[in-house]
């Protein structure tokens, strides 16, 4: 997986009716193209271990994971959740395939540097879990996001 580009959009007319501030990640999923979560050993359980709040039953995410969703959708959910856990607001995610293994993941942010950080970390976390490895830095990542919030205020 490769993070190709990060765009920070503010007051962009095509997004203004949804939210004025969005981050757009362009990611090449490479060999993970068309891979869904239900086809990756232990992916869902390993993600739940590090981000149990994603699995709150009032959300559709646990059901979608069990049914199987593309890994790029998980990247957006993780980026959003990291921001929320750090005390920020992130209200939506949009994922689009651009071409073959290239996709765009767009999510809202409150504070730009925290949103960019969350996007980068989301790609790293999902790639680690797709490879069948454990991700051990989630507490450090959330702390780093909280520090970015303090700098923002």
Image: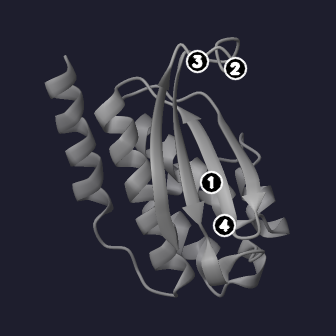
User: Are the residues tagged 2 and 3 within 8 Å (C-beta)?
Assistant: yes
Please rate how many residues cluster around mark 4, counting C-alpha atoms within 10 Å: few if below 14, some from 14 to 19, many from 20: many
Label 1 sits on a secondary structure element that is helix
Query: Which is more foreground, mark 1 or mark 2?
Result: 2
Picture coordinates of residue 27, whole percent (x, y) = 56, 60
Q: Is residue 96 above or below residue 134?
A: above
Front position among marks 1 and 3: 3
Residue identified by numbered label 4: 71
Earlier sequence position, callout 3 versus callout 4: 3
Q: Is residue 77 above or below residue 24?
A: below
Give the residue at mark 1.
55
- Left or right, residue 122 beside residue 142: right
Q: Residue at x 64, y 84 (%)?
A: 31
Looking at marks 1 and 4 on the same chain, the residue that comes earlier in the sequence is marked by 1
Q: Which residue is mark 2?
A: 14
Coloration mode: one colour
Percent coordinates x, y for residue 130 in the rendering: 56, 80
Q: Point out residue 80 in the picture as x, y percentages from the top left corner.
A: 52, 41
């Amino acid at each position: 997986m490769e993070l190709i580009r990060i765009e920070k959009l503010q007051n962009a007319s095509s997004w203004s009716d949804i939210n004025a501030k969005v981050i757009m990640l362009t990611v090449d999923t490479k060999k993970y193209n068309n891979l869904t979560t239900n086809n990756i050993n232990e992916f869902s359980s390993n993600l739940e271990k590090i981000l149990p709040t994603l699995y709150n039953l009032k959300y559709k995410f646990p059901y979608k994971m069990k049914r199987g969703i593309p890994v790029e959708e998980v990247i957006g959910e993780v980026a959003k959740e990291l921001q929320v856990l750090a005390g920020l607001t992130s209200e939506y995610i949009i994922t689009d395939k651009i071409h073959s293994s290239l996709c765009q993941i767009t999510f809202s942010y409150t504070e730009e540097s925290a949103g960019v950080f969350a996007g980068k970390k989301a790609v790293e976390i999902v790639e680690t879990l797709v490879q069948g490895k454990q991700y051990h830095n989630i507490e450090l990542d959330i702390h780093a996001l909280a520090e970015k919030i303090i700098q923002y205020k």
